[in-house]
Amino acid sequence: MDLYERIKKIKEQQSQKPSPAAKSSPAHTPSPTRKPSPPPETAGSRHETRREIPPAPAPSDGAARARSDGSDGLDESAPAESRGWISLYPMVWTRVLNYELSPPSSSPHPGLGWNGSGWDEYRYYDTETTGLSSGAGTYVFLFGSGRFTDQGFQVQQWFLGDFPWEPEFLTAMGESMEEEAVYVSYNGRSFDYPLLTSRYVMNGLVCPMYRQLDLLYIARRLFGQGLERCRLSDMEDHVLNIRRELDIPGSEIPDLYFRVQREADLEIEGKMPSAYRDLEPVFAHHAQDIVSLARLHIRMHRELENLQQGVLTPAVSVKGAARQLLSAGMEKEALDILREHAAGQRELLMLAGLLKRRREYEAAFPVWQKLFETYRDHDALTNILIEFEHRRKDYSSALRLIDRVLQEERSGLKEELPGLTPDAGRDPASADPGGSGNRAAQEHGAEDIRIRRLEYRRERIRRKISRRG
């Protein structure tokens, strides 16, 4: 008897034995809100025994209305139905919140991705989960999707009260999803979307959120300079100027959900247990995340528009904006922004690299000169010498520049390392690969290599001059 047959026989024996609970309470019946465990599946029977889930009723748009200050304007001590929650299934609820937020009059900037999509095609979504891993044991218990309407910004939330009702929960969510919509998230490409997809697959369903736009990567490029982290809360603090009061930290949400779930009276079919009132801070936190996501998208759109019109705000990175436009295939627009706003070394290096790639050497030459004179950039020096020697054939200018640089390099070596000899610096610190003595020797070696290359180039140019003469 192989291992499979032995396991099957043990399971059959266990299923024939009555449980202790059944012996002590013969009249016990399963809870009306907790679904009984399904019978063991046999090969090929999964799809045959899967039941059909009826469509969920759609909540009205006026189920709950938010105040203009960003709070949901609901009485937390009131019953769930008066707070806007509508029961779709015994342990699945939904509600709709409306906020006073309108999209810009202009179309979304093409540099943000999905060119051609209108503001009404975006769906801003977020999830709250039972953990931070994306493994099979992590559930989504709260899902929200926001969109722009004629009345403002509308957020719909779906809440799962107990795990056996996950198929109904996912089905109710999926009925509102549209294949042609663009689903906007913050770190959703790495966490929310893969987790949602896996939950749908494990329940034999399909997640139709095909078109994804993750604002985390754009936020890092545009606003990440000077910030240690680029969480959505950091964007609220430094970019959107939003201050949350009495907000629950995201790391505490899973523990609170499990505690409330244990305390909830799950025998009340169709009504949200009173214990779930303790989750109102989670619901408010979740809705605010979605609203902040839409506000951040609008801010990104306006900053890119302002840059193309010549207006630069301190919060925006010029190099990051150019990188974002390049990722969207807008090389000409990125080049225009760099030409107008490039000031630091990184922006100038990016500008010179783009011009060189486009073979616009005459336009890149003054950028290389500025990089060398201001930052002593040796790559810029190499490109200047190539321009003099190979394109302009201006050997005298190349020799003058090489002589000047060699004099500066040698005098700099004497000042920084006046007593350096091949046998010097044998102290304990230099024996350590990370010691300061070893780093100084490495820097000296790099400078020595640069000097030798410049001397070789000078001799080559002198031979060209002699052959010409």
Image (spheres, grey):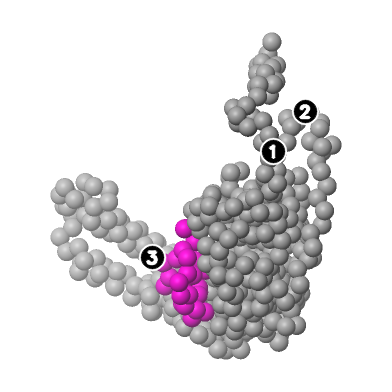
Tell me if 130 is positioned left or right of 158 in this view. Answer: left
Residue 255 percent across, percent down from the top left = 49, 53
Closer to us: mark 1 or mark 3? 1
Closer to us: mark 2 or mark 1? 1
Question: Which element type, helix, strand or loop, lies under badge 3?
Answer: helix
Q: Report the residue marked by disc 3.
A: 454
Closer to us: mark 2 or mark 3? 2
Q: From this viewpoint, is residue 364 visible? A: no
How far apart marks 2 and 3 lie (CA) works out to 78 Å
Quick one: label 1 or label 3, which is nearer the N terminus?
Answer: 1
Residue 418 percent across, percent down from the top left = 17, 64
Q: Nearer the viewer, residue 444 or 59?
A: 59
Tell me if 306 is positioned left or right of 181 in this view. Answer: left
Q: Report the residue marked by disc 1.
A: 29
Q: Report the residue marked by disc 2.
A: 42
Quick one: label 2 or label 1, which is nearer the N terminus?
Answer: 1
| Image-quadrant location for residue 51 | top right
User: Please, is residue 276 above or below residue 411 in the view?
Assistant: above
Question: Which element type, helix, strand or loop, lies under badge 1?
Answer: loop
Name the residue rendered at 15%, 60% in the picture: 419
Name the residue rendered at 57%, 89% in the picture: 310
